[in-house]
Structure formats: C-alpha cells, structure tokens
Image: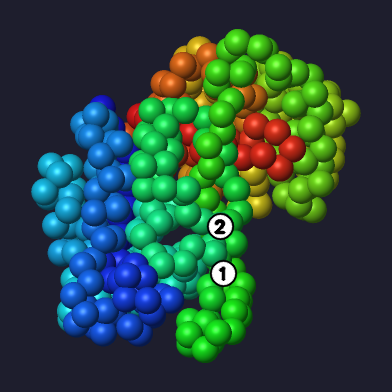
Amino acid sequence: MSRFHIGLIINPLAGLGGPAAFKGSDGMAEQALALGVEPKAVQRTRTALEQLLTLHERIEFVSYPGAMGGDLLAQMGFEHRLLGQVVAQPTTAEDTRQAVQQLQDAGVALILFAGGDGTARDVCAAVRDGQPVLGIPAGVKIQSGVYAISPRAAGELTARLVEGGLVRLASGEVRDIDESALREGRVTARWYGELCVPQEGGYVQAVKQGGVESEELVLADLAAWLESEWEPGARYVFGPGSTLHGLAQNLGLETTLLGVDVIEDGRVIARDVNEVELFALVEGRPTYLLVTAIGGQGHIIGRGNQQISPRVLRAVGLERLRVVATKRKLATLEGRPLLVDSGDVSLDDAFPDVVRVWAGYKEELLYPLSR
C-alpha cells in the first residue's frame, strides 16, 4: 500500500506571548519564557495528530528535526523522515521558510503547520502556488483564514483526506496584526497573500442519500468554466468516457464516447486518435490532458485509455493533467483512491499522493491517488 505523505512544521514558540499578555509572540518569545510561560504548540499539534493514529499505516510524515516536528512524531510512533537541520535555538522564521521549501521539494501532498499569523506569513512567503496547506491553530491571534477551527478539526480534516473523503480546495487569506502597534492600543492588520487550503466538503453523505447533484447541470457548469479558461493555441486532449463526452457536448463539440480526441481553439482537430497520432499531436506543443475516473473502480490512467501512453504523459507533463469527475462519480468509489497504471512504474511513482479533481464551476476537490 502506498503511503500518504504529509509535511509537518511546528513553530515551537507560537502562542507564548498570550499568557504573558504580550498580545502576540513575535520578537517576545524569550521574554515570555523568562516569565515561566510553557510552550503549547507541540501539545496542540499532538491533539491534531491523535486523530490520525488509526491511519498510521497509511501515512508517512516528512518534517524537520527536534521541536519543529521530529521529536513529536517519534514520540507518537508515526512513520516519518526528517529533512534539513535546525542550526540555532530558538527556531526562527527562516527555519520555517526553509522547511516549507524542502517539504515541497519532497513532494508532500499536504503541509500541516502549527502556529499563528506570523507562522502563516512565513509559510506564505515560501509556498508555491497550488500547494495545499492547513494550519493547526497554536498562536495568540488567528486573523488568517488558513487555520482549522481547532487542532482536533485540523486532524479530522486531514484524516478525511487520507481516507478518500471529498475535500474541496479554497483560497485562504493570510493576515497579521502589527503587534507593536497593538501593544500601543492600535489595531492595524495587513494582507500578506493567500494560501491553498483544504476545507470540509460534506458531499459524500448528501450525494449517496439525497442524490441532490444533477449530472447534467454539473457538466454544464464544468463546460462554462473550461470555456472561460481556454488557452489560445493550446491543445486539449479529451480522454474516453461519458463524463468528458458530456462535457464536450456542452461545449458544442462532437467527440467520440470511447475514443481520445484533440481540441484546439474551440474546435476538434482530431478524433479517435491512436497512440502514435496522439504523441505526434502533443509533442512539443502546449497541451492539457483531461481524463476521468472509471466509476466504481477509480482508474484514471491505464484502463480504456491506453492511447495515453507513458511517452504521451511525459510529453504533456503531469502538471497539465486534469481529472474531471462529478461528486456523484467519486462517491461510487466509497473512499477508495484514484488509480494509475500507465505501464511505467517510474512514471506512476511520479504522480502525486493527491490530485485535483474538477467537480463543478471553479470547484476543485483534493482526492487521494494510489499506484
């Protein structure tokens, strides 16, 4: 069983300024420690990770040594590996930024970080566009919209993602109050950017019980989104299946139900192509590849679309792969991961632990993937 890779960063100084009445911890950690304030960030992270203990065989953490994550993971018995090193104590904002960069290089599916708004600023300064992150609230002030409502909620949401529950992506603002001004009685907040944050989807139960999702309306919404995103001169490969065939119909395009078709500038330029033809059409051209999941089974590559070969996937680039599936279709998997079986083990291993799934108008879900 492939493991779900989660990055973990703890700011061990987060929250120290609260009990000391410093209105924050930025630049005040040593003074707070001198007053006898006990750090709480590690304990709050433990509360979050306790929600994942029953899933420990399915998870591998990637973290930094010592109080930034390594010590706690070892104590709790989680499988983990450590990157980098902490040169000095106490830890600094630069340690957080370096950890974010190295966790991303390691290809983690999600970065969990414990801290406050200052920590969120450091994460925001180093994170790449589209990297999912989630904050475990451990700071004095939490103005930013990138934190779960509690440590337990952060753990439960992460567990939901590992188990294959539907989790949507949203954009969360990073804001921070000027603590020096706050200590003088002035409240001044600044916007520092946005992070890509998973949020509770709440979809599986509704789809199974009420059938509230209209397949036709969802495909119409997806078509409207795709039409607004067409990249001039780029080629769009539509894989087989009723989902993509229906999407094409909503775009006014005649594609084949069980074949692979190529679209450019809003028109079909090749229908029902074979592997050789497809490779010739995408090699050296900006291309997006749209595939869907086989309902009830979950394969997105390697079942019914062998025209999309390893060399085609490499020519397109995995970063330009788009999975299109309605929430109803994902619900038929009952939490099982999406699957790839390209015939090239090294390529399969290059796929991320979670993929973004287009599920509605400007609505993306995170969903686990296995090999």
Q: Nearer the viewer, residue 192 or 291?
A: 192
Q: Position of residue 238 (x, y in %)?
A: 68, 31
Contact between labelled residues 1 and 2, with CB atoms less than 8 Å apart: yes
Give the left or right position of residue 50, taking residue 161 as reference: left
- Name the residue rendered at 41%, 21% in the picture: 336
Q: Quadrant of the N terminus?
A: top left
Residue 127, label in figure: none
As helix, strand or loop, the secondary structure at mark 1 comes to: strand
Position of residue 264 in the picture relative to residue 18 (left or right): right
Residue 179 position in % (x across, y down): 48, 82
Residue 69 in view of the camera: yes
Neighbor class of circle 2 (other Cα within 10 Å; few <14, some 14-19, many 20+) is many
Closer to the camera in the image, 89 or 283 = 89
Q: How many C-alpha atoms fall within 10 Å of the one at disc 1: few (<14), some, or many (≥20)?
A: many
Q: Which residue is mark 2?
A: 145
Query: Could you tell me which residue is drawn at 57 percent across and 39 percent down?
Result: 168
Q: Amino acid at mark 1?
A: Arg
Residue 43 vertical placement versus 261 (above, below): below
Question: What residue do we see at 81% from left, 42% from top?
Answer: 227
Residue 175: give its label: 1
Q: Looking at the image, is 282 positioned above or below residue 126?
A: above
Q: CA distance from mark 2 to mark 1?
A: 8 Å
Query: Where's residue 141, x and y in %?
Result: 46, 67
- Report which quarter residue 83 is drawn in: bottom left
